[in-house]
Image (spheres, rainbow, N blue to C red):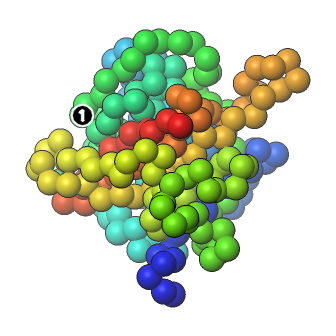
């Protein structure tokens, strides 16, 4: 493995598969497993959308160095666009996700809560799939969206983003990027999937010291 291709995983939403008996509980949509409670958005008072739940019992993900939690959760209120500013949250006592700080925007009811639940496959990113370009911008990626990625190096839509932990004030580490993946039905409306602002990408960060996660999107 050379330096250009740090270990990364591709998450693929299996739109044609409801949740099945797979070894790990990687999934898109629905509500968290093991009775873990989703927080409510302070803007619309509905439950946050669970975009991804990644099962960290999957030992191939040990390199992410996320400990003391059985799942990695990616949450956002898609209707209040909480992804426009950094949101901070943590998993408390393995029982509930607690939002420490969020800035809900204007409410636009577009997405059901919870999102329809689907299986997610997680596999190592192949060299020829690794998103890279000379200048590190997203535009060089294949036109097909849905390039959700754990680990590796992010491609920034705008300038490289640095986020400070809301608790210890140290810099947080990049953890994942969640792409826009919107499927439009024949009626011209959203059939499945999600979009961050204007075809944006959501970047996930972690403070491993404090066990705090953060997410913020950049739009095209
Ligand atoms: Zn909301
Ligand atoms: Zn911290």
- Please state the horizontal and vertical placement of residue 118, each as a whole percent of the image: 69, 44
- Please state the horizontal and vertical placement of residue 49, each as a whole percent of the image: 51, 31
**Pick the front one: 65 or 9:** 9
- Please state the horizontal and vertical placement of residue 74, each as a whole percent of the image: 46, 44
**Pick the front one: 202 or 23:** 202
Q: Is residue 52 visible?
A: no
Does dot 1 land on a helix, a strand or a loop? Answer: strand
Count of number-bearing discs: 1
Instruction: Tell me the quarter of the picture where residue 21 sits.
Output: bottom right
Which residue extends farthest front?
134
166 vs 148: above or below:
above
Instruction: Tell me the quarter of the picture where residue 3 sits.
Output: bottom left
23 vs 77: above or below:
below
| Residue beneath the point at 11% across and 50% down | 168
Which residue extends farthest right?
186
| Residue beneath the point at 20% across and 55% down | 171
Instruction: Using a 10 Å C-alpha cutoff, classify the residue at mark 1 as few (fewer than 14 neighbours), some (14 to 19) or many (20 or more).
Output: some
- Please state the horizontal and vertical placement of residue 165, each as a whole percent of the image: 20, 47
| Residue beneath the point at 35% across and 69% down | 65
Q: Is residue 140 visible?
A: yes
92 vs 131: above or below:
above
| Residue beneath the point at 51% across and 66% down | 134
**Pick the front one: 6 or 213:** 6
Which residue extends farthest left?
168
Q: Disc 1 designates what residue?
A: 100
């Amino acid at each position: 493995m050379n330096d250009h291709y740090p270990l990364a995983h591709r998450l693929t939403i299996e739109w044609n598969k409801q949740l099945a008996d797979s070894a790990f509980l990687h999934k898109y949509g629905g509500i968290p497993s093991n009775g873990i409670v989703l927080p409510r958005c302070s803007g619309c008072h509905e439950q946050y959308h669970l975009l991804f739940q990644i099962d960290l019992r999957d030992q191939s993900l040990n390199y992410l160095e996320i400990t003391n939690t059985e799942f990695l959760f990616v949450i956002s209120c898609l209707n209040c666009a909480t992804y426009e500013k950094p949101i901070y949250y943590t998993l408390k006592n393995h029982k509930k996700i607690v939002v420490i700080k969020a800035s809900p925007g204007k409410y636009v009811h577009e997405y059901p809560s919870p999102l329809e639940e689907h299986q997610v496959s997680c596999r190592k990113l192949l060299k020829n799939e690794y998103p890279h370009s000379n200048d590190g911008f997203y535009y060089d990626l294949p036109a097909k969206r849905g390039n959700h990625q754990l680990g590796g190096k992010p491609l920034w839509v705008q300038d490289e983003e640095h986020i400070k932990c809301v608790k210890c004030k140290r810099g947080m580490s990049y953890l994942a990027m969640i792409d826009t993946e919107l499927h439009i039905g024949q009626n011209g409306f959203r059939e499945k999937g999600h979009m961050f602002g204007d075809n944006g990408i959501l970047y996930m960060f972690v403070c491993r010291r404090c066990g705090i996660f953060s997410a913020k999107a950049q739009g095209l």
